[in-house]
Amino acid sequence: MSEPVPLAGRRRVTPEQIVDAAAALFAREGYHAVGTRHIADELGIRGASLYHHYRSKEEILAAICRRVTAEPVEETLPLLDDAGTPGTRLAALVRAHLHHLVRRRVEFLVGLQELAALTPEHRAEVESHRRHYQRRVRDTVAAGVRSGEFTVDDPGLAALALLDALNGTARWLDPDGPRSPHAVADVYVRMLVDGLLGRQG
Amino acid sequence: MSEPVPLAGRRRVTPEQIVDAAAALFAREGYHAVGTRHIADELGIRGASLYHHYRSKEEILAAICRRVTAEPVEETLPLLDDAGTPGTRLAALVRAHLHHLVRRRVEFLVGLQELAALTPEHRAEVESHRRHYQRRVRDTVAAGVRSGEFTVDDPGLAALALLDALNGTARWLDPDGPRSPHAVADVYVRMLVDGLLGRQG
DNA sequence: GTCTATATGCAGATAGAC
DNA sequence: GTCTATCTGCATATAGAC
């Protein structure tokens, strides 16, 4: 998130600040509803100045999406290679996944909703990362089924349901709300790993 | 869905056909990415002719959203008033909810993603229906907890997780794919009602 | 109920000064 | 690295003929 963005005044901006400001606007109003001038206003610069940092508005969107698809693969997925049973490893993934969703909430919403606005190349990149993530979760669920730790019928569907439940939190989980993300994570581990996946013991 | 829409040629259209065509386009490309001419092209009429049926593009969007928020409240929610335990009633709701998602798939995706494009009045209407639906599910979960049928810690979070898992299917469930919606519903009832909610017995 | 023609405004993007 | 000025095109919506 870098730092808070001023509302007006002439200044120098970084590519990071542009991505932050654009992500917040895209998440709230939608990519196509937000003009380049709108992004620039938020940063206190003129629309033309954006093009010194990015070659097009779509490149800004792609930067947002890249941030939010590469990170989980690089930072969260390795938890599935740690020691422990599939159940303990997936419990760790659930917590880390929710942590990531809170940290990158607006970027995540943009990446989820604005896929259609990406060029085919950029979209393919995002979808490839997402499929990879989903496949690793599914394989871990399947390992737990084989070892007898889980009791689901279809590891593929279970992985989809688990990830959809996790990702859905981005729409309503408020870090400053009554339920802290940490408390939600505790409940979700029980509901999803113990409940949905049917962890025994 | 009424009937298939021709690709070109001069014809008379109904408000239903406009909504169908617009919903498909909005779901695929996003509300703001689709022009009124684009919708008209799909129907084989001119852009101006749309304004005989709807006063604005946003009214078309509102009609799509109304269709997909009123229906579940009127058709699916009554299942929670039937006889049976909270578990059997929620199992029926899961099946009906998935059935609705398949039948109104594109409209549902639009209603989920384009809330920000609605006028405040139309958005309030949609959100009110949605909150009502969620509240009824939560209350039924809570009833099951009180009766000892379910074992979740937080009925509110459980309802959210359950609905997020259900709604997520709209993004990937393909009626013509390898898993039939009916088969998916069977698995989801087991995972969500027996698993996530911890139904005993 | 659809058409042609058009009003009006803003979109993304570029050129070149400072 | 940001600015002013501007290009070009398409957006939503309306007026009035058929």
Image (cartoon, coloured by chain):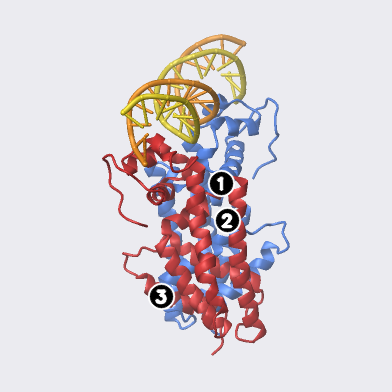
Chain colours: A red, B blue, C yellow, D orange
Can you identify the residue that label 3 sits on?
B154
Say which chain tag 1 marks: A
* Badge 3 amino acid: Asp
**B190 vs B133: above or below:** below
B116, B60: nearer the viewer: B116
Can you identify the residue that label 2 sits on?
A126
Residue at the spot 66% in from the left edge and 29% down from the top edge: B44
Instruction: Name the secondary structure under disc 3.
Output: loop
* Badge 1 amino acid: Leu
Labels 2 and 1: the sequence-earlier one: 1
Query: Mark 3 Cα within 10 Å, few/some/many (few <14, many 20+)?
Result: some
**Same chain, labels 2 and 3:** no
**A32 vs A66: above or below:** above
- Do labels 2 and 3 touch, CB within 8 Å? no
B97, B173: nearer the viewer: B173
The residues bearing labels 2 and 3 have C-alpha atoms spaced at a distance of 34 Å
Q: Position of residue A149 (x, y in %)?
A: 60, 86
Using the rendered image of the protein, determine whether residue B1 is visible from the camera's viewpoint: yes
Instruction: Name the secondary structure under disc 2.
Output: helix
- Do labels 2 and 1 touch, CB within 8 Å? yes
Residue at the spot 63% in from the left edge and 67% down from the top edge: B185
The dot on residue A118 is 1
* Badge 2 amino acid: Val
